[in-house]
């Protein structure tokens, strides 16, 4: 290790003068308490370091020690179900070591070095193994099997191997003969957080991430390996919506990052997640969830690092062949951390004070989403859902606008909908998805050939309502012809009977795609039938009096998810009453 001394301190920014000992992105220890920091700028006269811990008490002349390694995370069993801070320090161990408040320089291992895992070794003597290959297995939780992989960049022949048994993450279970010498193969490895992990091949995003939320799956779908932005002002329901995604989406592993959120809100999230039961296994949701909690009172630099820590952990499990869903709440706080550090570095500000490299940082982050063929020979994916908290719910601010450039899903949360108890509070007129062409072949094959057609019709009715409501505001609804009144009445049915969902109702909290399709089919069928009646000069008042529009609002509760054949009863009822009306 190399050692220099502090020249200046400005908040989380520490400078060292006239040093040639450090390299970019190197992790360093600052001061006598060895605060963790990272080199972020080097020129001929000065080295700039950002500290991931509170710098109060530091003074010029205190030592700065280099490690010659980049800021990295430890990868191995014990990550799932754990709660980490922004630089992968487990908070429970930090509490045991320093009490309820994290003391400066408190150092704990990211993984439990004493716990023994029941490991099944898959490799044998004289076998040639390559980077990314799975060489052992163990049960990390009741829900997740941990697949130990050969570190990236390591290839060789097995010259010594242990038997299956109980081992700690630091134990050597095999020795490899490589070009550079003998390599000790352990059950843990490390990876720098700012460098994406290597994959074999990027695959197309042609499989949907099914969430069971109708406004998402049917109207604005997202692909496995895709990226979505979830913007909304305070109280719009970002956290609640992400809860529903985490609980019901068909991802194997959830990575939840609380980036710069208030401490009481983060506590509520952790408590609620710990109480959630995984509907797939009946076990606690925490058995397939990784938490990164970085509250607003923690050092700002660690907030900036937390996003990279989370995506690196997600990539590790993706490489095992798992589908990972990553919830980042919220990237606005992350961008604010970039702005604060940039200001302390006296960099030239861009729009609204954000650094000029905000766009490239957002691009680098969302680019790490994707569906891939892994080095282990399997297929895995990372789907990123990034929440954005624009001030005053202003979607024209830089973080929201620039995030839209690198995501193909935009789920705009509307505070007015949330206040009206319409959840998920996704505004259907402002939101969009660009995955239709990629996912429609899958929907046609696995759900039904009519699924894209029905979605298109539902969206067109909602767009027609938006146009008509501008007229209604000016002259009232009474002056509209009956066919336009029908569009408004049908759109109301779509909003309350289809888009609005009850997270506390057992039949409505999660809705399978087949039922979603049948609900759309009934709505469109009623609309077409009513349209033909209006063409036959039957007043819309008489059609509404039949009660279809009010009754169909309740179909989401009345039809069980496992008995969608009952939708035929609605069809029969519609036909019967219309026949009587016509006759």
Image (cartoon, grey):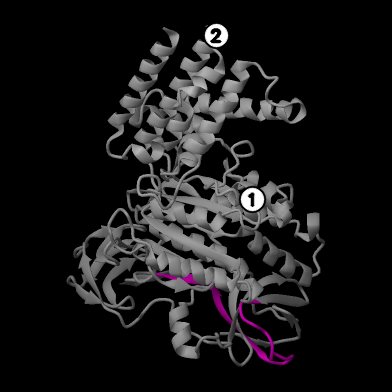
> Which residue position holds label 1?
415
The part of the chain drawn in magenta is 51-75
Quarter of the rendering occupied by the N terminus: bottom right
Q: Residue at x 50, y 60 (%)?
A: 311
Residue 496 inside the magenta-drawn segment: no
Q: Is residue 66 above or below residue 130?
A: below
Characterize the local packing of mark 2: few (<14), some (14-19) or many (20 or more) Cα atoms within 10 angstroms: few
Image point 56% across, 72% down: which residue? Answer: 264
Measured as percent of width and height from the top left, residue 476 is found at: 72, 27
Decide if residue 233 is on the left or right side of residue 95. Answer: right
In the image: residue 178, left or right of residue 10: left
Helix, strand or loop under label 1: helix
Per the rendering, the mark at residue 365 is none
Quarter of the image where the C terminus is located:
top left
Marks 1 and 2 sit apart, C-alpha to C-alpha, by: 39 Å
Estimate the x, y position of residue 309 in percent, counting from the top left.
52, 66
Q: Position of residue 552 (x, y in %)?
A: 43, 31
Residue 151 figure quarter: bottom left
Residue 95 is at least partly visible in this image: yes
Q: Residue at x 27, y 57 (%)?
A: 281
Residue 136, percent from left and from top: 25, 64
* 39 or 332, nearer to the observer: 332
Task: Assign a secondary structure to mark 2.
Answer: helix
Write down the residue under mark 2.
535
């Amino acid at each position: 290790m190399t050692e220099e001394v502090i020249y200046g301190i400005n908040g989380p920014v520490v400078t060292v003068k006239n040093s040639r000992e450090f390299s970019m992105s190197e992790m360093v220890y600052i001061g006598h308490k060895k605060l963790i920091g990272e080199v972020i700028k080097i020129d001929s006269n000065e080295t700039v370091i950002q500290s991931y811990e509170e710098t109060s008490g530091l003074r010029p002349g205190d030592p700065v020690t280099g490690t010659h390694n980049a800021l990295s995370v430890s990868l191995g069993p014990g990550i799932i179900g754990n709660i980490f801070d922004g630089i992968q320090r487990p908070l429970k161990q930090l509490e045991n070591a320093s009490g309820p408040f994290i003391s400066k320089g408190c150092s704990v291992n990211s993984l439990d070095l004493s716990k023994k895992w029941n490991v099944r070794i898959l490799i044998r003597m004289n076998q040639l193994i390559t980077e990314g290959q799975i060489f052992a297995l163990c049960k990390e939780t009741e829900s997740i099997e941990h697949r130990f992989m050969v570190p990236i960049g390591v290839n060789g022949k097995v010259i010594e191997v242990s038997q299956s048994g109980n081992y700690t993450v630091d134990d050597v279970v095999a020795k490899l003969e490589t070009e550079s010498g003998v390599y000790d193969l352990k059950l843990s490895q490390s990876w720098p957080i700012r460098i994406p992990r290597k994959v074999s091949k990027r695959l197309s995003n042609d499989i949907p991430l099914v969430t069971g939320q109708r406004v998402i799956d049917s109207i604005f779908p997202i692909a496995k390996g895709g990226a979505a932005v979830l913007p909304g002002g305070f109280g719009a329901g970002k956290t609640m919506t992400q809860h529903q995604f985490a609980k019901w989406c068909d991802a194997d592993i959830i990575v939840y990052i609380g980036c710069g959120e208030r401490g009481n809100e983060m506590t509520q999230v952790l408590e609620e997640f710990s109480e959630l039961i995984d509907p797939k296994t009946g076990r606690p949701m925490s058995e397939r969830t990784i938490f990164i909690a970085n509250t607003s009172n923690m050092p700002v630099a660690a907030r900036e690092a937390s996003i990279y820590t989370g995506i690196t952990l997600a990539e590790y499990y993706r490489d095992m062949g798992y589908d990972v869903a990553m919830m980042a709440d919220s990237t606005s706080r992350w961008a604010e951390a970039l702005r604060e550090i940039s200001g302390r570095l006296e960099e030239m500000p861009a729009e609204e004070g954000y650094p000029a490299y905000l766009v490239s940082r957002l691009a680098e982050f969302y680019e790490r989403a994707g569906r891939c063929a892994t080095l282990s020979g399997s297929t895995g994916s990372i789907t990123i859902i990034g929440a954005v908290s624009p001030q005053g719910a202003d979607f024209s601010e830089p973080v929201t606008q620039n995030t839209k450039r690198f995501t193909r899903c935009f789920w705009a949360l509307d505070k007015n909908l949330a206040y009206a108890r319409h959840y998920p509070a996704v505004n259907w007129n402002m939101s969009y998805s660009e995955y239709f062409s990629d996912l429609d072949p899958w929907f046609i094959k696995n759900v039904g050939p009519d699924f894209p057609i029905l979605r298109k019709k539902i969206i067109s009715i909602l767009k027609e309502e938006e146009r008509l409501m501008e007229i209604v505001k000016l002259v009232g609804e009474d002056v509209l012809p009956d066919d336009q009144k029908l569009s408004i009445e049908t759109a109301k049915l779509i909003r309350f009977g289809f888009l609005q969902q009850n997270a506390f109702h057992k039949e409505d909290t999660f809705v399978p795609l087949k039922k979603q399709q049948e609900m759309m089919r009934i709505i469109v069928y009623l609309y077409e039938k009513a349209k033909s009646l209006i063409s036959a000069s039957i007043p819309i008042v008489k059609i509404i009096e039949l009660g279809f529009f009010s009754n169909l609002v309740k179909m989401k509760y009345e039809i069980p998810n496992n008995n969608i054949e009952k939708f035929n009863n609605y069809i029969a009822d519609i036909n019967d009453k219309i026949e009587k009306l016509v006759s």
